[in-house]
Image (tube, rainbow, N blue to C red):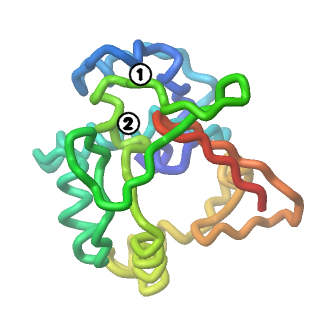
């Protein structure tokens, strides 16, 4: 599970292997990910992978019997006071929600429709406000929710070769003072950040 959390599992992205307009069960998605050819030896290399977080969401249900969003809401969002944080729902009316857009031939268009399946997986379906992000940061700084030994594990810099290649630590600090570009592609948005 640590390798799933730290993107060192060598499990490739599942996104190119699915039909975004089709519904899938958790079992079908887990089986699909299980058939993907590993990119490298697990634990040897940092390679961002949404597939790892997809699997973590499925594992949460297997262990707790709860949908990952319910578990996260009850055990993280509510205790930290994250009032607007939620899993994407096309049905819910969410005050001040921002819709996703895409560019096409210099025109701004609504994002493409995708199956509700992909708005419910644990690899990018959380929406929150800046106030929620600040509540999250306060929780991390206060070492809230977890036992001290769990925080020690999270904050401990691993000596593995893969961990040395992870771009930033939990607080966004980097060992290198060079410009980096991160691009995260999600179902609804494409976000670029320069730091």
Residue at numbered disc 2: 54
Furthest residue to the front? 107
For the residue carrying disc 2, how many other residues have a C-alpha within 10 Å: few (<14), some (14-19), or many (20+)? many
Q: Quadrant of the C terminus?
A: bottom right
Residue 138 quadrant: bottom left
Q: Secondary structure at mark 1?
A: helix
Q: Note whether 22 is above or below 2 in the view shown.
A: above
186 or 144, which is in the foreground?
186
Residue 9 in the image, given as x and y percentages of width and height:
53, 36
Nearer the N terminus, badge 1 or badge 2? 1
Left or right, 142 with respect to 105, comes to left
Q: Note whether 152 is above or below 70 in the view shown.
A: below
Q: Do the numbered discs 1 and 2 sit on residues whose CB atoms are within 8 Å? A: yes
Kindly identify the residue that appears in the image at 39 percent across and 61 percent down: 128
Q: Note whether 112 is above or below 37 in the view shown.
A: below
126 or 68, which is in the foreground?
126
Kindly identify the residue that appears in the image at 47 percent across and 38 percent down: 188
Residue at numbered disc 1: 33
For the residue carrying disc 1, how many other residues have a C-alpha within 10 Å: few (<14), some (14-19), or many (20+)? many
102 or 31, which is in the foreground?
102
């Amino acid at each position: 599970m640590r390798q799933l959390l730290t993107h060192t599992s060598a499990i490739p992205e599942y996104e190119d292997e699915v039909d975004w307009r089709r519904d899938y069960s958790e079992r079908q998605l887990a089986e699909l990910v299980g058939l993907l050819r590993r990119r490298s030896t697990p634990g040897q290399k940092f390679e961002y992978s949404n597939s790892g977080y997809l699997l973590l969401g499925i594992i949460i249900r297997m262990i707790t019997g709860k949908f990952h969003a319910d578990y996260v809401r009850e055990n993280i969002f509510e205790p930290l006071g994250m009032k607007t944080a939620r899993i994407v729902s096309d049905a819910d009316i969410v005050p001040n929600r921002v819709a996703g857009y895409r560019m096409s031939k210099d025109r701004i268009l609504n994002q493409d429709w995708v199956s509700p399946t992909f708005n419910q997986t644990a690899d990018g379906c959380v929406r929150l406000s800046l106030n929620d992000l600040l509540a999250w940061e306060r929780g991390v700084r206060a070492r809230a929710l977890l036992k001290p030994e769990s925080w020690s594990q999270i904050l401990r810099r691993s000596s593995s070769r893969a961990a040395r290649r992870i771009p930033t630590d939990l607080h966004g600090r980097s060992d290198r003072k060079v410009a980096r570009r991160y691009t995260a592609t999600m179902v609804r948005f494409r976000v670029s950040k320069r730091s």
